Image: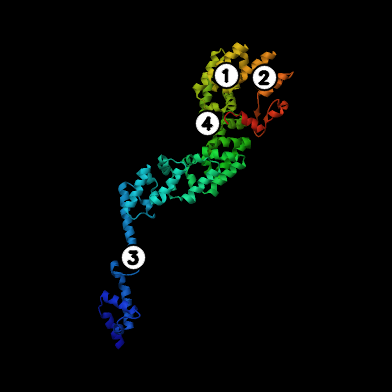
Amino acid sequence: MLTRRKILTLFSTKYTSRQFNEVSKLSQVPSHPYPEIRKTLNPFRVFLLCAWNSTQASKFPEYEMPSVTWGVIQGRKEKLVSRVIVFDFLRGLGIVPDELQDLELPSTVEVMRERVEFLQKLGLTIDDINDYPLMLGCSVRKNMIPVLGYLEKIGISRSKLGGFIKSYPQVLHASVIVELVPVVKFLRGLDVEREDIGYVLQKYPELLGFKLEGTMSTSVAYLVSIGVNPRDIGPMVTQYPYFLGMRVGTVIKPFIDYLFSLGLPKKILARMLEKRAYLLGYDLEETIKPNVDCLISFGIGKECLPSVIAQYPQILGLPLKAKLSSQQYFFSLKLKIDPEGFARVVEKMPQVVSLHQNVIMKPVEFLLGRAIAPHDVASMVVKCPQLVALRVELMKNSFYFFKSEMGRPLKELVEFPEYFTYSLESRIKPRYQRLKSKGIRCSLNWMLNCSDQRFEERLQGNYIETESSGPTFLMGGKLNLPGNAILSDEEEESDDEVLYRRTVSL
């Protein structure tokens, strides 16, 4: 009963927080300097006091709680207050900081102001920062200056750094040593010239974010596997670096396989890509296939498609239906060439789809002015579409020599309009003089449509071989060269080399 009364008395006694703290401290001290005080403290009573103190601690203000967590709680509050102040500062500049909620930011407005002003000095506007506000999480000294210094070192001029950051702000988060340097070394390993590195990265800055062992290496390896010369990879990257970011399985391989299916030899396709890597950027389903179907619908033979593409690869990416419709109507109206004849023109010179109509009319008007009948001019254009792309000044010189020196009838020009495509000084005059000195009379075709070595063989022979119109190209087959049985050893060429040599656009 006595013990119970003592306990009740204990709970009814009022103690101040200071007294409780003193009691707690005293109960925890192993050797108190005043033993007499320690003896007066009942251990059971101290236990009850400490228990009551722990249950009531949360009722006291934080600044009255000298616990080990007090500093952390206070720091977190200070950080929240600082963040609110920084956010208010950004909003005052017109920057929306919503995406910065989970980002480590400066604790003072002064540091944040330094970052904003540094970006503005580069040429970035508030709108640019709003497009990618995460750049404000980059330290000027630890992130921005090292990255910008390295970019300037590899060839991006200081005046263009702002534009580079606008197009690829993620670079500010990159590590120069771990991320940027390996990509530059990779490009150099592909034979990209040192002075071209900056140009390449300005065209396609996202390269700095790619993993070397991923898409870039795979794309290069596949192109080399189909015949692209490894030494040409560097110039290809300089011309069109975007193919390094294309997936082989979903973009590059379907493109290659489709052109193979049309009959383009692998070697020719590889040469096309070496010279025009941007072809890989044409969309297969939306652009290339519809354009091939368009060519067929306008009368171009399927067997001629490989030759058309090899001569003018850009035709795969043009707004072709509109161009073909316009040119076909023009040829019919002005040149009196029907749709079938127009198709033959496109087969022989597909570049005609992009020729300006004023350019086409100049050589046509010259021929009409030489008393050649309109239907004969049309026939000449169908036989030799290159006529419509010639300079009239050169045609005048060749025509004058034909009439005054050679004294031949216009009928021969109508039959062999290719005469105008040969150089007057280096081929027509020298060969005509050789024939004249030997007293040989032959057609323009026999005189001009052969190499210099073949021409010498013809002069030394006692026969005139059958004339031919040149090589033909069959889809999936070989180039057939009429008369190739008597080619000399020095003139022998592979089928693909002949096509490559004769395509005017490669």
Tag 4 or tag 1, which sits nearer the N-term? 4
Front: mark 2 or 4: 2
Residue 52 % position (x, y): 31, 76
For residue 477, side relative to residue 293 (left or right): right
Q: Nearer the viewer, residue 152 or 113?
A: 152
Element carrying mark 1 = helix
503 to 193, vertically: above or below: above
Report the amino acid beneath label 1: Ala
Element carrying mark 2 = helix
Say whether marks 2 and 4 touch (CB < 8 Å): no
Please give the name of the residue rendered at 39% of the width and 45% of the height, measured from the top-left corner.
131
Real-space Cα separation, disc 2 to disc 1, in angstroms: 23 Å
Report the amino acid beneath label 2: Trp
Q: Pointer 2: what residue?
A: 446
Q: Residues within 10 Å of mark 4 (few under 14, many from 20)?
A: many
Residue, far front: 153
Please give the name of the residue rendered at 60% of the width and 35% of the height, measured from the top-left corner.
271
Residue 50 % position (x, y): 32, 77
Real-space Cα separation, disc 4 to disc 3, in angstroms: 72 Å
Real-space Cα separation, disc 1 to disc 3, in angstroms: 95 Å
Front: mark 2 or 1: 2
Report the amino acid beneath label 4: Leu
Real-space Cα separation, disc 2 to disc 4, in angstroms: 37 Å
Q: Residues within 10 Å of mark 3 (few under 14, many from 20)?
A: few
Q: Pointer 3: what residue?
A: 71
Q: Pointer 4: what residue?
A: 320
Q: Pointer 1: what residue?
A: 378
Q: Nearer the viewer, residue 432 or 72?
A: 432
